[in-house]
Amino acid sequence: MNAISIRKAKYFLTGMLSTSVLLALLVGASMLGGCQSTAEPTPTPTKTPMGEQAQATATAVPDSSLAEPTAATPGDAAPSDTPIPPTEAPAEQPTTDAGQAVDTPVPPTPTTAPKPAADGVMRSPDFGAQAFLWWRPEVADRDLQLMEDAGFNWVKQWFAWQDIEGAGRGQYDWSRTDRIVDQVADHGLNLLVRLSPAADKAFWAGEPPESTDAFAEFAGEVARRYKGRIHAYQIWNEPNLSREWGNKAPDPASYAQMLRKSYQAIKAADPNAIVVTAGMAPTTADQFEAMYDTKFYDLMYQAMGGNSDGYFDMLGVHGAGYAVSPETDPAQIAGNPAWYNNDPSGAERVRVYSFRHIEDIRKIMEKYGDSDKKVVVLEFGWTFDPRTDSPYYWHGQGAGIDMFVQADYLKRAYQYAAANWPWIGLMSLIYMPDSEWKPETEQYYWSIMDPSPPGQTFWRPAYIVLCDYMNRQQGGECIHDPARQ
């Protein structure tokens, strides 16, 4: 076993890894190249259900097959072997392969000051993550505590329309939302709520754009009930996909009208709430099923008459990093087919396969005089998917990205934004995981923690690295970093 493997094994056995060890691994190992595809790419996004929530995650990636690795992104480094997710259960002491018991770390006592009450103000950049708080209160409380410990200031949660007003117009069930809003407040976090229906469920309100008035009414009722407690609202999700728009062709003008009416309803109920547009799915397609994001945003601005006042406060975007580091210039993507999986869409559209594609969307805002408004990154991240038959493999392990590289890239994304994007607001990564996710689902490999039931903690490098970074940025320290022991 080489030195890198030995150091990783120590992490697996203890369930933790210090930032210093992580950085040593990242600097000392070599980067694997991306996986090329010989198949004809189909740039229509795909969807994978996410447990009971049936959450949709869209991506532009087609299936790909194995091929020889290509050159790595300059300046990147990755371990040469892929780690196995650690499993640290408190009821069972871990052992080495030889059966020798090893010490299990004792959870540290917090030494930082209590987190101040949420105020709804966004730093630039600010730290957030998507969480899954809906079904199990004990899981929600555990995950919110982990987020508070890590230095996150915001949590993003989906309020599915059918789950609240599913029984009929004006018939509201606030039981879960009341509990979630209370729990988030108890942990001193700001709350961003995504308001949208579950796209794959039938509903009395019908489909957009016909459902726009009913949706705006619903948004206003949520804002009225939680005035001052929900700090920001995301209006709909990925309307550039037909499956998210009532199985109709994407319609930027109709979405703009939904924005306007929802904005008016929310502001009438809670003038201080922040209204954010939906983020668009990363796709290079321009057809009935999907419209690429820069085209959708530009047409949306045209429908608003070039003036977004009265429509939204901040622009929402999605920023998956795919196969390259967060600093990679989007102009470089077209020069390496492995970085865009041989997508035939052309140099301008394949820029979407980079985190900094967010800058392309910012230029549209500037074009229409919206430089004074911030960008909110509603989803971003990297996967370390090791499944060779997965459509995500080419920009996961096939690109040399394992959970250590994922951790480094997430931190560097925040660092790049802090140094280069004065217009950035919240950056909400994916994900604090659903505790029910299994290795057979694609979201499992995007998450910063291993899914686990209450009473157990399955650490990943991303959580520890971000915990160190975010706490230090805010004058604290990560209580879960074993380097403190």
Image (tube, rainbow, N blue to C red):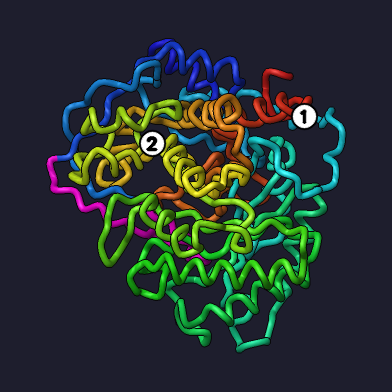
Q: Quadrant of residue 94?
A: top right
> Callout 1: few (<14), some (14-19), or many (20+) C-alpha neighbours within 10 Å?
few
Residue nearer the viewer, 314 or 39 = 314
The residue that appears at 55% across and 27% down in the rendered structure is 420
Residue, disc 2: 354
The residue that appears at 58% across and 24% down in the rendered structure is 419
The earlier-in-sequence mark between 2 and 1 is 1
Look at the image and tell me whether residue 51 can be seen: no
Q: Amino acid at mark 1?
A: Pro
Residue, disc 1: 108
The residue that appears at 61% across and 21% down in the rendered structure is 18
- Find residue 182 and report its horizontal and vertical position in percent: 80, 60
User: Taken as a whole, is the magenta stretch helix, strand or loop?
Assistant: loop
Check residue 385 in the rendering and tell me which mark sits there, or answer none: none
Q: Amino acid at mark 2?
A: Ser
Marks 2/1 in contact by CB < 8 Å: the verdict is: no
